Image (cartoon, helix red, strand yellow):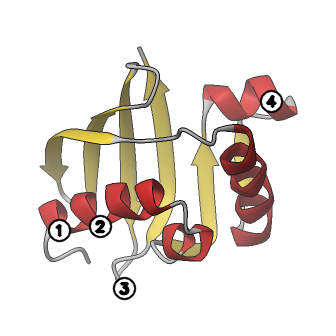
Amino acid sequence: MLTDPHAFARDWVSAWNSRDLDRILSHYSTEIVFLSPIAQQRTGNGRVAGIPALRSYWSKALAALPDLKFELLEVLTEHECLTIRYRNQRGRSVAETFEFDANGSVVRSFACYS
């Protein structure tokens, strides 16, 4: 269970802005399922499952986006999940929803773009 949603959101954004893939992945369960229209565009499959697949996908994304930067806008909380609204380096609004397991690791994540 997640104890401090705002701390999670700040750390998650900071991890992305640091470009440290291990730090980014530390937020996720080994059974993670990530859904994204960007993954669909880049790989032909909008579902990325498991840490190895997510590591591969995001390592390519980080290499392709040297100017990647997220700005935290809002944190919305609910039972066993939260949604982070942020702006990316292109000025695009993004909402990402995270579902957590009992240990506070993300088991499902959904990225939605404006």
- Disc 2 residue type (three-letter): Asp
The span from disc 2 to disc 3 (Cα, nearest Å) is: 17 Å
| Secondary structure beneath label 4 | helix
Q: Which residue is mark 2?
A: 11
Residue 106 visible in the displayed image:
yes
Can you give x and y, in whole percent of width and height, for residue 30 in the image? 63, 77
The span from disc 1 to disc 4 (Cα, nearest Å) is: 31 Å
Point out which mark residue 114 bears: none
From the viewer's perspective, is residue 79 above or below residue 36? below
Can you give x and y, in whole percent of width and height, for residue 55 in the image? 73, 64
Residue 80 visible in the displayed image:
no
Residue sitting at the far front: 67
Q: Which residue is mark 3?
A: 103
Q: Is residue 110 left or right of residue 37?
A: left
The answer to whether the residues at label 1 and label 2 have Cβ atoms under 8 Å apart is yes
From the viewer's perspective, is residue 40 above or below residue 15? above
Identify the image quadrant of the N terminus: bottom left
- Disc 4 residue type (three-letter): Arg
